[in-house]
Image (cartoon, rainbow, N blue to C red):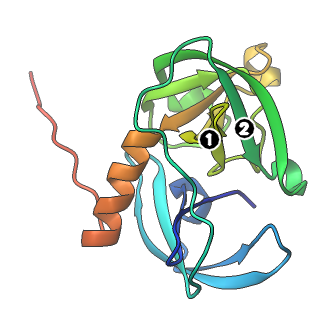
Amino acid sequence: IGSGVIYRSDGYIITNNHLVEGSRNVEVAFADGSTEKGQVVGTDPTTDIAVVKVDRTNLPAASFAGTDPIVGQMAVAVGSPSGFESTVTSGIVSGTGREVPAEITGGQQESSLVDLIQTDAAINPGNSGGALANRDGQVIGINVAYLPPQQTGAENIGFAIPSQAATTVADQIIDNGEAVHPYLGVY
């Protein structure tokens, strides 16, 4: 169980790779109570972004922020933690450019996640793939991980993939079925 953000009105939804990994089809529940079968268009384990397509049109697509968030600005996490649908928690953007090693995500991720937004808005199991929004209702990130208090001793440290990274990867997946990441290997 996880969350997602309607990316385009023609049925494309952004979520997390770790939610749909290994699946070709998923069940998508909408806020109005309706459900649709969704097809996994593609996934990107590097950024933990996935795109799901439902056969539905005229969906209310989210507005994604075009600028990076600022530390201290208000942040609202939207999702379905522990199956409680359409839950909203609030906090601030606590940091940007964060890296989260895989071993401290409580099994949520196999590899390290980089260039993340840190927030103290509560993110729990089920919030993954949901929106981290600003005070104007624009998506500034896609919720991806949190530090489990029992493992780290930390409370309310959550992370989101910045919206610009999420939409760039989603566009590549929609257009090409995969995302490509440049890298430089140095010894």
Please tell me in which quadrant of the rendered image residue 26 appears.
bottom right
Disc 2 on helix, strand or loop?
strand
**Mark in front: 2 vs 1:** 2
Residue 77's disc is: 2
Q: Is 60 left or right of 63, judged from the image as shown?
A: right
- Give whichever of discs 2 and 1 has the lower sequence position: 2
Q: Is residue 160 above or below residue 11?
A: above
Residue at the (53%, 26%) spot, across then down:
117
* Residue 24 appears in the picture as rendered: yes
**Residue beneath label 1, please?**
143
Say which quadrant the C terminus sits in: top left
Task: Using the numbered discs, state the Cα–Cα distance from disc 2 to disc 1 in whole angstroms.
Answer: 7 Å
Disc 1 on helix, strand or loop?
strand
Q: Is 119 left or right of 179, judged from the image as shown?
A: right
How many discs mark residues in the rendered view?
2
**Front-most of residues 144 and 65:** 65
Residue at the (50%, 43%) spot, across then down:
110
Say which quadrant the N terminus sits in: bottom right
Callout 2 crowding tier (Cα within 10 Å): few <14, some 14–19, many ≥20: many
Which kind of residue does numbered mark 2 sit on?
A: Ala
Callout 1 crowding tier (Cα within 10 Å): few <14, some 14–19, many ≥20: many
Rendered location of residue 73, percent (x, y): 62, 17
**Front-most of residues 184 and 12:** 12
* Residue 107 appears in the picture as rendered: no
Rendered location of residue 63, percent (x, y): 53, 50
Label 1 near label 2: C-beta < 8 Å? yes
Q: Is residue 19 above or below residue 8?
A: above
Please tell me in which quadrant of the rendered image residue 145 appears.
top right
Residue at the (67%, 31%) spot, across then down:
135
Q: Is 187 left or right of 156, judged from the image as shown?
A: left
